[in-house]
Amino acid sequence: MDPTQIALRFVVAFIFAVVFGLERQRSHKPVGFGTFVFVTIGATGLAIVSVELGTETPLSILGSVVTGIGFLGAGALIKSGDRTHGFTTATSIWAFSILGLLIGLGEFWMAGVMYGLIWLVILVDTYLEKKGIGSYQRKLVIKTNRLIPQKELKNLLAQNLNKYKVMSVEIEKETPVMIFTYLIQSKKNDINKLPNILYQMDWVHSCKVE
């Protein structure tokens, strides 16, 4: 293969990975641009080598990349309480390994279509997160400094959230303290503002959004 062609494939893979990786890092995702760049150019390099060696059945070599990246993607998952986060980032790592293979094999048009579809999914995913639609739920834990009517807290949540559901209510009689756990769903900005609103209540001791 011509050295210019090899360089071109690495440059295309590098640019695709850097642009996407920077967006993931800017969004404070568990995996940043470095991981996406290494995965993509590594897969590109392996695909180029398989072409250069003239391997008759390169699918076994290329398939090993996709399988191996699956373990790397699993490391991007974050367990928080009873919920697991990071599936989009984990699967995008896997997708970029395939993207690198396509670029390395010289399938630029296919890689371009795949890259565009990946961005489309990310944009829709971001929109849904901002709107608080679907799986964009959080767990809210509120600890009070005295016993309060539960109706008072429900009214406050109803004014600031789209949906909420009681998961548990704990009362420490000796203190006395109440601990409420809710599953909440709303726009991202509304959820981010909620702790500040709660801290204005004199009966709130602490609150945590997971």
Image (cartoon, rainbow, N blue to C red):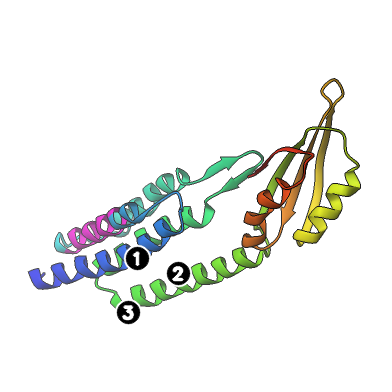
The amino acid type found where label 1 is placed reads Leu
Residue named by callout 1 = 99
The amino acid type found where label 3 is placed reads Trp
Residue named by callout 3 = 109
175 left or right, relative to 81? right
Residue named by callout 2 = 118
21 left or right, relative to 52? right
Name which of mark 2 and mark 1 comes first in the sequence: 1
Q: CA distance from mark 3 to mark 2?
A: 14 Å
Residue closest to the eye, 31 or 112: 31
Q: Secondary structure at mark 1?
A: helix
* Residue lying at 41% horizontally and 59% vertically, measured from the top left: 26
Q: Which residues are magenta?
A: 38-51
Q: Are marks 2 and 1 in contact (CB under 8 Å)?
A: yes
Which secondary structure is most common in the magenta stretch? helix
Residue closest to the eye, 97 or 197: 197
Q: Dot 1, crowdedness within 10 Å: few (<14), some or many (≥20)? A: many
Q: Secondary structure at mark 2?
A: helix
Residue 163 to residue 8: above or below:
above
- Quarter of the image containing the C terminus? top right
Examine the image and state in which quarter residue 175 appears. Answer: top right
* 45 part of magenta stretch: yes
34 left or right, relative to 77? left
